[in-house]
């Protein structure tokens, strides 16, 4: 049974209209509770017994395991489909939570990232339950909270014991099949000087100028990445300075300067290897200048890169299912991190797939409506592929 396009579009519009800004990103934001409750009601109205599971206070995941029969209810799900329901803040997007349709596109905060994926996932599940006789194994759908910050939703999903043989994670991919994405690690470097009155250069030591040496060395480190073999789908690793602060007032030598930076990692790289690079960089600066002193923090957070072999049975079957529906689908990589890596670390191999659009997190975020329907039909075919 094909996807009911009006149902998919309606739930997408409704979800965009319900603000679900991540409160860990925007202090005071309402969070995901209202959107999760709305989605649960929609699924229940369509015969799917969805539950709310709190990943954090007032921040519930929406989870439903759909089984073909009571006897199969205790069987491990063949497939898990995951999409996040939180969004970033409105920023400079006008009327961010008033969905607007123009030229085949739906505009609004979260339209592309990734309430369109939530709508496609739900529309696919609704279509499949209407042909339940064709499925033999259960599958799980989950709309999770907090992906935009700490992935509390997916972590809670796993902590509660939800599992499956494999997973589809919904993110904007232009309807291509993403089989690799980068990881990241956050660090803080503090250069240490000596506070003194600005008129006493023999007593003061300038921590901010010391940080200048660090920035130059970071430039050199990133240039060295160019000599490394590029990943066929992800290119080269990267780093950037994110936040910098230091000093007390104009008339004093600064005793401290603080830099926070992000390192984007390829498969095979780890937070530990990235930390070792930075420690070697600082040690070299100290060796070259006896007045230079800096410390490194590595506990700000990190997530691993992810990759799955394109010839693995799960990937080849998923690609075939998508191509049966759309004819064309290619492999791709993604520079952004996704929850797929968390699922894989729990023994659930996954791929990333989702609709098309532009303006991610920007003032003109939109999703191409036809791509939402195509995504939903592909998900329906994938469910039938793995659950029959």
Image (cartoon, rainbow, N blue to C red):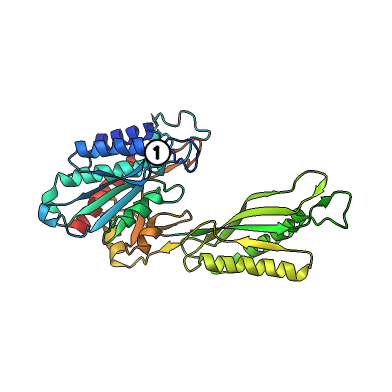
In the rendered structure, the answer to whether residue 45 lies left or right of residue 181 reads left
Indicate whether 347 appears above or below 248: below
Q: Which residue is mark 1?
A: 111
| Residue under the image location 48 percent in, 55 percent down | 335
What x and y, as percent, mark residue 102? 40, 30
Q: Position of residue 79 (x, y in %)?
A: 25, 56
User: Circle 1 — which element?
Assistant: helix
Task: Give x and y (percent) for residue 329.
Answer: 34, 55
- Name above or below for residue 206 compared with residue 99: below
Taking the spot 79% from the left edge, 64% from the top edge, the residue there is 291
Vertical position of residue 153 compared to residue 275: above or below: above
Would residue 99 be found to the left or right of residue 11 on screen?
right
Q: Is residue 137 above or below residue 30?
A: below
Where the C terminus falls, by quadrant? Answer: bottom left
In the foreground, 48 or 320: 48
Crowd class of label 1 (few under 14; some 14 to 19; many from 20; radius 10 Å): many
| Residue 278: quadrant of the picture | bottom right
Q: Quadrant of the N terminus?
A: top left
Relative placement, left or right, of 6 versus 264 is left
Q: Where is residue 222 shown, x and y percent of the image? A: 62, 62
The answer to whether residue 104 is visible is no
Question: Would you identify the image quadrant in which residue 334 lies?
Answer: bottom left
Side (left or right) of 361 relative to 246: left
Q: Is residue 42 visible?
A: yes
**What is the number of callouts on the image?**
1
């Amino acid at each position: 049974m094909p996807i009911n396009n009006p149902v998919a579009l309606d739930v997408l519009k409704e979800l965009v209209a319900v603000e679900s800004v991540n409160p860990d990103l925007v202090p005071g934001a309402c969070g995901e509770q209202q959107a999760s409750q709305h989605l649960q009601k929609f699924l229940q109205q369509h015969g799917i017994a969805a539950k709310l599971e709190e990943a954090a206070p007032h921040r519930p995941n929406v989870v439903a395991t759909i089984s073909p029969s009571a006897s199969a209810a205790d069987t491990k799900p063949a497939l898990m489909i995951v999409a996040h329901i939180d969004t970033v803040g409105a920023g400079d997007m006008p009327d961010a939570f008033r969905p607007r349709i123009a030229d085949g596109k739906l505009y609004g905060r979260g339209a592309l990232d990734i309430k369109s994926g939530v709508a496609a996932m739900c529309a696919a599940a609704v279509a499949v339950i209407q042909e339940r006789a064709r499925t033999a194994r259960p599958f799980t759908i989950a709309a999770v909270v907090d992906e935009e910050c700490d992935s509390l939703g997916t972590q809670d999903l796993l902590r509660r014991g939800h599992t499956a043989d494999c997973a589809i994670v919904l993110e904007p991919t232009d309807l291509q099949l993403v089989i690799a994405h980068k990881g990241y690690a956050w660090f803080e470097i503090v250069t240490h000087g000596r506070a003194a009155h600005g008129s006493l250069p023999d007593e003061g030591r300038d921590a901010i100028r010391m940080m200048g040496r660090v920035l130059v060395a970071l430039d050199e480190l990133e240039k060295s990445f160019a000599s490394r073999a590029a990943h066929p789908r992800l290119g080269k690793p990267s780093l950037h300075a994110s936040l910098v602060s230091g000093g007390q007032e104009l008339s004093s030598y600064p005793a401290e300067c603080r830099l926070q930076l992000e390192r984007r990692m390829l498969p095979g790289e780890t937070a530990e290897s990235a930390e070792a690079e930075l420690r070697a960089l600082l040690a070299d600066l100290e060796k070259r200048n006896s007045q230079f002193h800096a410390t490194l923090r590595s506990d700000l957070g990190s997530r691993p890169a992810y990759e799955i072999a394109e010839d693995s049975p799960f990937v080849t079957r998923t690609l075939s299912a998508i191509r049966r529906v759309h004819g064309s689908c290619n492999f791709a990589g993604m520079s952004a991190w996704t929850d797929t890596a968390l699922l894989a670390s729990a023994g659930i191999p996954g791929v990333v797939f989702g609709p098309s659009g532009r303006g991610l997190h920007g003032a003109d975020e939109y999703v191409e409506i036809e791509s939402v329907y195509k995504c939903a039909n592909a998900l329906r075919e994938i469910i039938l592929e793995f659950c029959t």
